[in-house]
């Protein structure tokens, strides 16, 4: 590692470690945190990761200046400029929003995500930085997984509020739970033994923790099955040992596979069906990618320890077993489809009158709450609350209003068709020069199918939930994944060009 990389690596590690940590709510805007429930929608907050992000940005600028290429970028220029237009559009659509600080805050988050994508696209091409980032995500994932397992076993928090842990219990409104006993609707409080609390870690929702643990599992599998962060091929156990001598996870198979089992157990107790499907896609994709490159014994070990991570919590905890069955075979009282369909209907009503330009950056929840369809003049549930906090006569409590569980639909709601087209155009320009040419158009060999499954593992969350766009921890992962994916695609493109050009080396291609 070069000396000029040291401050950058330290800033990267600090940013990763502060990723899920505490926040301070700066402004309690309308329709948020009125009931004490845990929704981030409509709340302006400062996160520990925001401070670390400023330090990371400064270290990145200093590193590029020292490298003598301060204006160079790893993104295709058309994608870069479309991204700039997307940020400008988010700023423009924040102007008419009331309360105005919420609009500026939402636009700033889009700008932060875009800048993070630029940084990750640059740094992911540095093997040392990449390996350190992957290792940090694994360590953080293990800690979050153990914390989530402890929360489920205790049915309460661990009093780690200074790290950002929410106050959790089975009787707290808004805390995510799984019904294991069918009850009539007459119950107000939660009877003991009828529900199982889902794992939160220090994240705002179990689904967010589940997606983060998917990223941690990806990092662990990368370090176990693809030493040096996938920068070199591995064809047998002896070569695997030689090229990964300095990689802990590849050099120590038993501890590393135990780490994998802990991560899988953490995903299980989030009881997030999206995370479960994502884990299935992820491991299937890795196994297909590794069939001819990694010792078969190691692949069998990965499969075995994955099953251990799934079966141990189920065998040891009857409530966990009942909750798993309830999630796989949901009872009639399960709110999954009802909540999803309700959020879609309310969002589509708001979109109809603002299809082209949207309701404004950050204005999704307020526009849904203020809709005439959600006002009941005969209902005065909130008559004791100040009028400026909650409009009288809402048919639902404020924390029950949700963004549509689909990222493209969230963008369409807030930034309109213009914003959605800009985002999709940026994504197309990011991946078309690399992935479409060297992956999707070619015939579907097992490795290409495996790569598609890995992409699907991460894409799934953006299609079935809204937190990759609306919640800070999800935004970091979404934009970071975009930067990492385009960087890896560029690497594959350069390697392909090196093979095509009559046996020319990759280094010569990069030099050109």
Image (cartoon, helix red, strand yellow):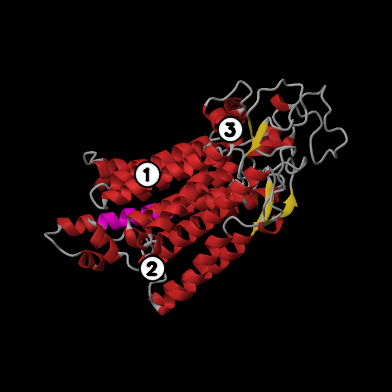
Residue 298 in the figure: left or right of residue 189: left
Reading the image, the residue beneath label 2 is 128
Residue 152 in the figure: left or right of residue 370: left
Q: Nearer the viewer, mark 2 or mark 1?
A: 1
Q: Is residue 271 above or below residue 225?
A: above
SS at mark 1 in the image:
helix
Q: Residue at x 47, y 57 (%)?
A: 138
Q: Residues within 10 Å of mark 3 (few under 14, many from 20)?
A: many
Reading the image, the residue beneath label 3 is 323
Find the residue positioned furthest to the bottom: 3
Q: In terms of depth relative to the viewer, which is nearer, 81 or 390?
A: 390
Q: Residue at x 37, y 65 (%)?
A: 247
Q: Tell me where residue 224 appears, x and y as whole percent.
A: 36, 56
Q: Earlier in the sequence, mark 2 or mark 3?
A: 2
Q: Quadrant of the C terminus?
A: bottom left
Q: Tell me where residue 37 appears, x and y as whole percent.
A: 72, 41
Per the model, the C-alpha gap separating discs 2 and 3 is 41 Å
Q: Earlier in the sequence, mark 3 or mark 1?
A: 1
Q: In terms of depth relative to the viewer, which is nearer, 279 or 266?
A: 266
Q: Residue at x 59, y 22 (%)?
A: 331
Q: Residue 222 shows which numbered tag?
A: none
Q: Tell me where residue 486 appears, x and y as whole percent.
A: 37, 53
SS at mark 2 in the image:
helix
Reading the image, the residue beneath label 1 is 303
Give the extent of the magenta segment. 483-494
| Residue 78 visible in the current orientation | no
Q: Tell me where residue 119 appears, x and y as whole percent.
A: 45, 62
């Amino acid at each position: 590692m070069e000396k000029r990389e040291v401050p950058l690596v330290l800033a990267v590690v600090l940013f990763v470690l502060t990723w899920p940590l505490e926040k301070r709510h700066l402004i309690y805007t309308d329709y948020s945190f009125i009931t004490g429930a845990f929704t981030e929608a409509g709340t302006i907050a400062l996160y520990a990761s925001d401070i670390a992000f400023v330090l990371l940005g400064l270290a990145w600028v200093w590193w590029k200046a020292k490298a003598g290429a301060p204006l160079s970028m790893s993104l295709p220029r058309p994608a870069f400029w479309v991204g700039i237009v997307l940020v400008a559009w988010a700023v423009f659509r924040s102007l008419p929003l009331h309360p105005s600080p919420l609009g500026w805050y939402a636009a700033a988050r889009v700008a932060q995500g875009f800048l993070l994508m630029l940084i990750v696209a640059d740094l992911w091409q540095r093997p040392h930085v990449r390996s350190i980032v992957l290792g940090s995500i694994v360590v953080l994932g293990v800690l979050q997984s153990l914390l989530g397992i402890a929360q489920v076993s205790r049915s309460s928090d661990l009093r780690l509020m200074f790290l950002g842990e929410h106050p959790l219990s089975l009787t707290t409104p808004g805390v995510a739970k799984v019904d294991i006993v069918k009850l009539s609707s007459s119950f107000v409080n939660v009877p003991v033994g009828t529900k199982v609390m889902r794992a939160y870690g220090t994240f705002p929702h179990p689904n967010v923790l589940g997606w983060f643990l998917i990223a941690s599992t990806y990092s662990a599998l990368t370090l176990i099955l693809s030493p040096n962060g996938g920068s070199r091929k591995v064809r047998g156990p002896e070569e695997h040992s030689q090229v990964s001598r300095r990689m802990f996870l590849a050099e120590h198979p038993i501890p590393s596979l135990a780490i994998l089992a802990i991560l899988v157990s953490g995903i299980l107790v989030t009881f997030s069906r999206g995370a479960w499907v994502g884990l299935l896609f992820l491991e299937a994709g890795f196994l297909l990618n590794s069939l001819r490159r990694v010792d078969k014994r190691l692949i069998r070990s990965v499969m075995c320890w994955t099953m251990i991570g799934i079966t141990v919590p189920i065998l040891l905890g009857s409530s966990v077993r009942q909750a798993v069955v309830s999630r796989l075979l949901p009872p009639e009282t399960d709110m999954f489809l009802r909540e999803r369909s309700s959020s879609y209907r309310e969002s589509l009503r708001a979109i109809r009158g603002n299809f082209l330009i949207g309701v404004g950056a950050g204005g999704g929840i307020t526009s849904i709450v203020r809709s005439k369809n959600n006002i009941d003049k005969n209902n005065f549930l909130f008559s004791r609350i100040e009028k400026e906090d909650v409009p009288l006569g809402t048919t639902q409590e404020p924390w029950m209003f949700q963004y549509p569980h689909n990222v493209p639909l969230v963008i369409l709601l807030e930034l309109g068709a213009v914003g959605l087209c800009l985002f999709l155009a940026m994504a197309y320009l990011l991946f078309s020069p690399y992935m479409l040419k060297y992956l999707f158009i070619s015939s579907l060999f097992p490795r290409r199918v495996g790569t598609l499954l890995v992409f699907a593992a991460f894409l799934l969350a953006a299609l079935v939930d809204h937190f990759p766009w609306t919640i800070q921890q999800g935004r970091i992962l979404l934009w970071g994944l975009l930067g990492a994916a385009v960087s890896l695609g560029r690497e594959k493109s350069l390697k392909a060009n090196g093979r095509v050009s009559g046996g020319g080396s990759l280094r010569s291609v990069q030099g050109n």
